[in-house]
Image (tube, rainbow, N blue to C red):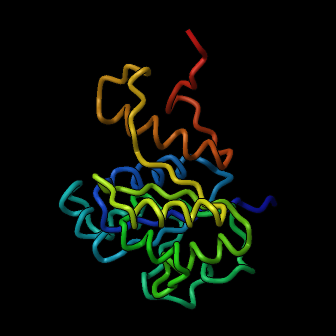
Amino acid sequence: MSVKKRLIISMTGATGAIYGVRMLQVLQTQSEWESHLVISSAGLVNLKHELNMTRDELSELADFTHGINDIAATIASGGFKTEGMIIAPCSMKTLAAVAHGFGDNLISRGADVVLKERRRLVVMPRETPLHLVHIRNMAIVTEMGGIMFPPMPAFYSKNNSISAMVDETVGRILDMFDVDVIGLYTPWEGL
């Protein structure tokens, strides 16, 4: 029996709940992957507002759901092996917590664990325009090994729907973890 690869998907109160939801949907189709979900209370507000989804509906998409304040959860320990973590979307509050090691909830603690264990952390910051503290916090997380991946559409793909733009971003991020993303997007092959 092979052990499944584990990936943590965290969602915060920034706009863009569709990204976290779509990642969970894709991971559901991957038999070799196990998803671990954490969503903040502000993330739940956005989930309801943007997608008219409930916590229970979201939890059905994940293999495991952890409470935001469950600091004793498996993903709060470096001994629990994961491939890494994606924060999609990531609020500036959560970005600041990650940048400064302020592990006051399971999202920021999970990110701290991923960074200290030298695993992959991908952060989808959602704010515009950015001020200097936002940019400095992104730089700090990048210097610690995190990857900043703002959800910016690639217009050269000529996607004609929001769904296709979301799939392209989700595909590119999941591809960083070697998740099978065939059909989500077409990599650039030149002109």
On screen, residue 134 above or below 29: below
Residue 104: percent from left, percent from top: 46, 88
Seen at 36% across and 24% down, the residue is 159
**Residue 158 occupies quadrant:** top left
In the picture, measured across the screen, residue 11 lies left or right of residue 13, that is right
Residue 11: percent from left, percent from top: 40, 65
On screen, residue 59 above or below 181: below
Residue 73: percent from left, percent from top: 57, 85
Task: State the residue lying farthest toward the bottom.
Answer: 72
Front-most of residues 119 and 93:
93
Front-most of residues 41 and 63:
41
Seen at 21% across and 55% down, the residue is 50
Which part of the image, by quadrant, shows the C terminus? Answer: top right
In the picture, measured across the screen, residue 144 lies left or right of residue 92, that is right
Seen at 57% across and 91% down, the residue is 72
Front-most of residues 36 and 61:
36
**Residue 83 occupies quadrant:** bottom right
**Residue 126 occupies quadrant:** bottom left
Number of marks drawn = 0
In the picture, measured across the screen, residue 175 lies left or right of residue 52, that is right
Residue 132: percent from left, percent from top: 38, 62
Task: State the residue lying farthest toward the front.
Answer: 132
Seen at 29% across and 29% down, the residue is 161
Task: State the residue lying farthest toward the right.
Answer: 1
Which part of the image, by quadrant, shows the N terminus? Answer: bottom right
